[in-house]
Amino acid sequence: MANNDSIYPISVVMTMTDLTARQIRYYESHELIKPARSKGNQRLYTPQDVENLLLIKSLLEKGLNLDGIKAVINGAKTAEGVTPTATPPPSTPAVFSPQRPEGPKLTSLYPVNNQEALNNWLHHKRK
């Protein structure tokens, strides 16, 4: 049964976050969000779920991977007094290093007209 705060269907959340339904379901499968379900098994999202999705999107843009995002979200839940659903093992390596040098930015994954930028990026990665 759906929580009273769970009021947004996935179509509204997609508009609010600029994420696709597939991305939202992917983050759910990795337990980064946990939407309630209606009697008809429709996902219903809370305002907190929307905030978490926006946080996930922001952290991905900053270079964090999913393990790092889980650590941030679980850390936020612990700070709020909620027990996290999963704790990372103590030997987990650092997921984000602020000292890592920034490489050249690409404008496309398939830069047809961006050959020079691609070569510079590949050269930077080989160093």
Image (cartoon, helix red, strand yellow):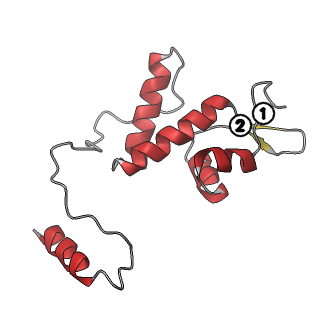
- Above-or-below relation of 108 to 84: below
Residue 105: image location, x then y, percent: 27, 64
Left or right of 38? Residue 55 is left
- The answer to which of 50 and 93 lies nearer the viewer is 50
In-front residue for pair 3/119? 119
Which amino acid type is shown beneath numbered disc 1? Ile
Is 62 left or right of 54, judged from the image as shown?
A: left
Residue at 66% across, 50% down: 14
Front residue of 84 and 104: 104
Three-letter residue code for mark 2 = Tyr
Labels 1 and 2 touching (C-beta < 8 A): yes
What quarter of the picture does the N terminus occupy? Answer: top right
Q: Is residue 53 left or right of residue 79?
A: right
* Residue carrying label 1: 7
> As drawn, which residue projects farthest toward the front?
113
Q: To which quarter of the image does residue 113 belong?
A: bottom left
Image coordinates for residue 102, horizontal then vertical, percent = 19, 55
Q: Nearer the viewer, residue 46 or 104?
A: 104
* Badge 2 element: loop
Q: Position of residue 28 (x, y in %)?
A: 61, 46
- Location of residue 51 with respect to 108 vertically, above or below: above
- Residue sticking out furthest to the left: 127
Answer above or below: position of 13 versus 89.
below
**Residue 87 visible in the current orientation:** no
Q: Position of residue 71 (x, y in %)?
A: 40, 35
Cα distance between the residues tagged 1 and 2: 6 Å
The C terminus, quarter of image: bottom left
Disc 2 target residue: 45
Upstream in the sequence, badge 1 or badge 2?
Answer: 1
For image coordinates 38% across by 73% down, the residue present is 109
Q: Would you call the spot at circle 1 few (<14 residues within 10 Å), some (14-19), or many (20 or more)?
A: some
Could you tell me how many numbered marks the image carries?
2
